[in-house]
Amino acid sequence: MGLLSKKDSKLILDPLADNNPITIQVLGICSALAITAQLKPSIVMAISVLFVMGVGNVVISLMRNIIPSKIRIIVQLIVVATLVIIVDQVLKAFAYELSKELSVFIGLIITNCIIMGRFEAFALGNGPWRSFLDGIGNAAGYGVILVIVGFFRELLGSGTLFGFPVLGNPVTKTGLYGIGYENNGFMVLPPMALIVVGIIIWVQRSRNKELIEEN
Amino acid sequence: MAINTDKNSYTIIFAIIMVIVVGSILAGFANGLKPKIKENQRFEKQQNILYAMGVNENEGPNDVTFVSTDKVEEQFHKYITKQLVIQGDDITENDEAYLIDIKKEETKAKDPDYTRKLPLFIGEKDGKEIYVIPVRGKGLWDAIWGFVAVDKSMTIQGVFYDHKGETPGLGAEINQRYFMDDFTGESFLHGGAFEGIEVSKSNNDPTNTNTDDNKVDAIAGATITGDGVAAMLRKDVKMYVPYFKSLQE
């Protein structure tokens, strides 16, 4: 990447793989379970978090020298909460159906530990540009896992992608269903999200042995 | 910069400024987007009312597809010919009756001096006169609501239910076709007496072939939500009975 220095591009690329917030740091699991039953909400959630983290990290970074350390956690909370309310309102105004579907989970971005974690660990000690990259990188790392999990859960659980049937029609028994394939209803339930995330963690660590923690 | 950020006075001033700034940003956003959000909510209501009376874009047997938002206003005015507000014996026509907030009316009605406003939407589809009654009640976790379309003799022509936060896969299924479609054909009036509709666990009639028993099949695992639906119908539809009796005279 010519645009970014080596150090900067590391900020974006690291969280995508070797320092992924979900699979390595195991943060933000709760929302990963809740909204990944289908692909569409997963993507919207990923984009919303991307926005909140990108902007939030910059705002915190710009204020890092004037934030009183006594109330810095409260200040961080206010910044996240404000951004989340803005996202929520914009969705309600321009993507009403979707906002109904995501309902409470948009509000729950506030409690997403990745965001507060990055504010505290990175944005408070780095400049706005690097904080922005770090925010985007971590949100993208989170989003990638969300989309992967959403893809498999919707495909195997409902036989659709983005709501379009891709494996045939289970009622009239066309496509794969014609030869005896059945949707796995368990995929739609939250426990399966954990199992899918577990499989991703296993694949990732068996490919890169350095990631395995020693106990 | 040599600001002592540890001083108490600084902390307090910072907090105050922060609250003012954030407050005005949010107020600005809320104000700017309010008309658009209101409009979305209005369209949703129109879509739900139309859905109950059978105006929708369903294709498959399990679809719940509303009239699209760009057409809904036009379709709403095409199919809904009259909107009434019933307040005691006083019946007035009001083109914005569908905007009446049932929840607020419920709260106001707790005052014994207040006569509750009951909105009723009268429409025509395939040459048949249809009356749509809004209902609202409690599920297991939160509010449930819906619209019930009946004909002159209070026989159900179609229903639409929705919920705020019922359990996915269980109570949340009340907005699915296999549950909603069962209500069609049941009647609230039997020989002039009002009778509710029971959401029953022992009905054994999954496609509702018996429409005289005032029972529909419950959803397994959603007893409280199902009871909530039955209670909601009994409570809210009953208030409209005097009006329908006056129609038949």
Image (cartoon, coloured by chain):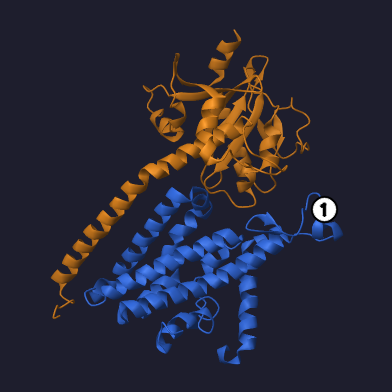
Chain colours: A blue, B orange
**Above or below: residue B165 compared with residue A154:** above
Which chain does tag 1 point to?
Answer: A
How packed is label 1: few (under 14 Cα within 10 Å), some, or many (20 or more)?
Answer: some
Label 1's element? loop
Relative to B8, A32 lies left or right: right
Q: Is residue A93 above or below residue B149?
A: below
Determine whether B36 is above or below B75 in the image: below
Q: Find the residue positioned furthest to the top.
A: B249
Q: Position of residue A175 (x, y in %)?
A: 81, 58
Task: Determine which residue is flagged by label 1.
Answer: A173
- Residue in the image at 56% along x and 19% along y: B241
Point out residue A73 in the picture as x, y percentages from the top left corner: 31, 71
Residue B221 located left or right of residue B134? right
Relative placement, left or right, of B226 versus A86 is: right
Decide which of A75, A101 is in the foreground and name it: A101
Residue at 75% in and 36% down: B203
Q: Residue at x 46, y 58 (%)?
A: A106
Indicate the quadrant containing the C terminus of chain A: top left, top right, bottom left or bottom right. bottom right
* x and y percentages locating residue B206 in the rendered image: 76, 39
Q: Say which quarter of the image contains residue B184.
A: top right
Q: Residue at x 55, y 72 (%)?
A: A144
Total marks shown come to 1
In the picture as drawn, the residue positioned furthest to the front comes out as: A2
A202 displayed left or right of B242:
right
Visible in this render: residue B77?
yes
Q: Is residue B83 above or below residue B22?
A: above
Residue type beneath disc 1? Lys
User: At which x and y percent is residue B224?
Assistant: 61, 43
Q: Is residue B146 visible?
A: no
